[in-house]
Amino acid sequence: METVLTSLGLALLFLFLGIPLMLGKVKRNSLYGARFPATMADDRVWDVVNRKTGFVFVAGGAVAGIVDLLAVAGVVTRDVGQYVVGALMVYILITSVWLWRYSERVARERGVTARDMDVGRTEPLLVAIGCFAVSVIGVLSAFSTPNPWLGFRVPATLADPAVWHQVNLRVGLTLAGLSGVFGFMFLGLRNMTEGERKRLFSGLFIGWLAAIILVAVAGTLFAYSLTY
């Protein structure tokens, strides 16, 4: 039940943050909104991109909230909460890359040039920070005990502390290692030319997401193999 409530709270947060952006009520600032180089360089780009960002948040929050309410009502299993949280995280990562690309396209259409913005150096740094954050979470998960918040949480690991330990140790350390490697690779992009960054960034980002999904699938299969 705690996981469902956490997921529902996250969905409501998405709605709370997304509605003002979608309505165009948030002016360019240094704290809140889609803060890409292109959006920070021009108010027109900020308005267009952040309205789209708001829609992304509202859509994701609404879908997640509906699923969570169905879980609270008992229509679907309450275990769905953990999957909703994971799906929202992946959703934000993917849409962030898309919004970044979209912001640069809008900037070109509005006549904002590269001289007006630092194109392509901020995003690799932000993603690298995300990679290192996932690495830390992986290490903490590897040595965690069953709990409502942290760790590789599937029914098989929640049902047996021994399975939890074996699965989280392997999944956590694997995730930490892979994300750490990708983090340093993203940092390396900052020293490349703009063209090289643009050419490599999307591939690296997709590779990182694919690695996370692969680890999750492998961890799930391993967890259930231990129960038979």
Image (spheres, helix red, strand yellow):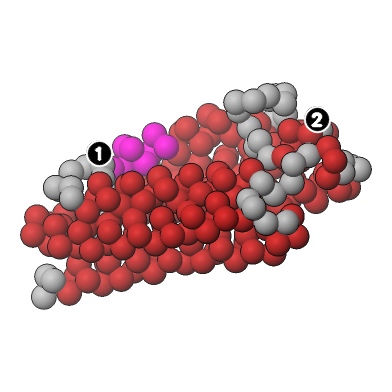
Is 76 situated left or right of 193 in this image?
left
Q: Is residue 60 above or below residue 211?
A: above
Q: Callout 2 environment at 10 Å: few (<14), some (14 to 19), or many (20+)?
A: few
Quadrant of the drawing holding the N terminus: top left
Is 221 situated left or right of 58 in this image?
left
Is 226 situated left or right of 216 in this image?
left
Question: Would you say the magenta stretch is mainly helix, strand or loop?
Answer: helix
* Residue ID for mark 1: 2
Tell which residue pokes out farthest to the front in this image.
191
Is 46 situated left or right of 59 in this image?
right
Nearer the observer: mark 1 or 2; the answer is 2
Which numbered tag is attached to residue 43? 2
Question: What residue is drawn where x is 66% and y is 46%?
Answer: 121
> Residue 201 is drawn in which quadrant?
bottom right
Which numbered tag is attached to residue 123? none
Where does residue 118 sit, x and y in percent of width and height? 74, 41
Name the amino acid, label 2: Asp
Question: What residue is drawn where x is 27% and y is 57%?
Answer: 172
